[in-house]
Image: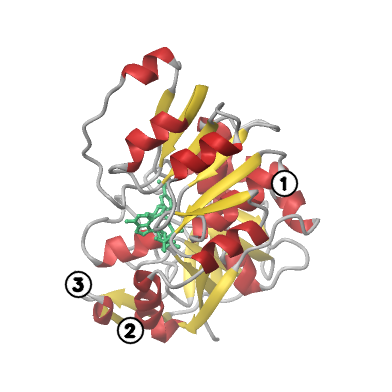
Amino acid sequence: MGIALPESMRCVEITAPGGPEVLRPAERPAPVPGPGEILVEVAAAGVNRPDVLQRLGRYDPPPGASDLPGLEIAGRVVALGEGVTEWAATDPVCALVAGGGYAQYCAVPAGQALPVPKGLTMVEAAALPETVFTVWTNVFERGALKPGEVFLVHGGSSGIGTTAIQLAGARGARVFATAGSADKCRACEGLGAERAIDYRTEDFVAVLKEATGGKGVDVVLDMVGGDYIARDIEVMAPDGRHVSIAFLRGAKVTLNLFPVMTKRLTLTGSTLRARPAAEKARIARAVRDEVWPLVEEGRMKPVVHATFPLEQAAEAHRLMESSAHIGKIVLTVGP
Ligand SMILES: NC(=O)c1ccc[n+]([C@@H]2O[C@H](COP(=O)([O-])OP(=O)(O)OC[C@H]3O[C@@H](n4cnc5c(N)ncnc54)[C@H](OP(=O)(O)O)[C@@H]3O)[C@@H](O)[C@H]2O)c1
């Protein structure tokens, strides 16, 4: 073990399902790292839309996970559980967790931690894991996006969207995005999108058909669902892959599946949080090999819209639910 284990910690709890006001600062016993886990003193924790769903009572933590919100952290290792050899006390790490990020200490399966990329602050590092793991496994594993292919991400100004635009661009794809205002569209283009489409004023199907000379889009990363699914299918190129990661406009739709057959399309999707630790560790290794070099070369950078002290997590959720942000919202956790 490294430093003496802390006994208690500050955290933010979900006191009941409801609005942002149900997030309340609290004091709890600090977690004890189990076999194969490390204990991290959290410097910063990313806020993600799934945290809002959990707060509303619509996204329960998987069995065995902390009931505290928070899916990603950055900080320093303070203790090692049995059998951990790859990390040492004081190592700066960031990590994907299944819960418990809104806290001063967090127990993390060792395989889900990554070194803080060179040149990044703890706040920037905390903004990476959830979106990078999600984009990697959905766009590049399930969607198999290749250099030169055409990629479309809906919600381009979201945490997920800003990561997807940069990563797909850095790996040689032609990138398009949709977003809900002219400012958000300019931000997407600033991150490398060839063209961002304001879905409130433009029809993305028409714009993309024209931009691709009628060929269409090879891979779609969709968090919107609802009426978007049929329009995505319409604008997809032969052998295209459609990956669903959320359904902000609803998961139940009536579809004409004929084009799926004639264009040989693949409709797929995934969630990250409930996957086994071994699977997340596998994704972590791929991210370390394939994405971390791009971050360290400055070819992609987390877009941090705002930070809030941990105790103001409710304010952070209000901002996220307003959808006024571009990129990530991060909580800072003082000693
Ligand atoms: N499956 C997985 O493994 C996984 C993992 C992480 C996140 N997710 C999901 O991915 C999504 C993005 O997460 P995030 O943390 O990046 O969230 P976020 O930053 O809050 O972004 C959500 C975005 O959705 C857009 N949006 C909201 N309602 C919309 C609607 N009705 N039509 C079109 N666009 C709409 C908003 O921008 P506009 O102003 O442009 O509308 C906003 O930028 C969330 O739905 C989350 O649950 C899935």
Query: Which of the two discs, 1 and 2, labels the residue nearer the N terminus?
Result: 2
Q: Is residue 183 above or below residue 152?
A: below
Q: Is residue 7 above or below residue 67?
A: below
Could you tell me which quadrant the C terminus lies in? Answer: bottom right
**Residue 272 spot, x, y in % from top left:** 43, 45
Could you tell me which quadrant the N terminus lies in? Answer: bottom right
Q: Residues within 10 Å of mark 2 (few under 14, many from 20)?
A: some
Query: Which of the two discs, 3 and 2, labels the residue nearer the N terminus?
Result: 3
Residue highlighted by disc 1: 170
**Answer yes or no: do the residues labelled 1 and 2 have beta carbons within 8 Å?**
no
Residue highlighted by disc 3: 18
**Residue 2 spot, x, y in % from top left:** 63, 69
Q: Residue 31: which quarter of the image?
A: bottom left
**Amino acid type at mark 3:** Gly
**Residue 274 spot, x, y in % from top left:** 37, 45
**Amino acid type at mark 2:** Ala
Mark 3 or 2: the one toward you: 3
Q: Quadrant of ligand 1?
A: bottom left
- Tell me which residue sits at (42%, 41%) in the image: 276
Q: CA distance from mark 1 to mark 2?
A: 42 Å
- Tell me which residue sits at (47%, 71%) in the image: 325
- Tell me which residue sits at (42%, 66%) in the image: 70
- Tell me the element at label 1: helix
Q: CA distance from mark 3 to mark 2?
A: 17 Å
Taking 32 as reference, is 149 left or right? right
Q: Nearer the viewer, residue 200 or 39?
A: 200
**Amino acid type at mark 1:** Ala
Residue highlighted by disc 2: 26
- Tell me the element at label 3: loop
**Residue 203 spot, x, y in % from top left:** 42, 46
- Tell me the element at label 2: strand
Query: Which of the two discs, 1 and 3, labels the residue nearer the N terminus?
Result: 3
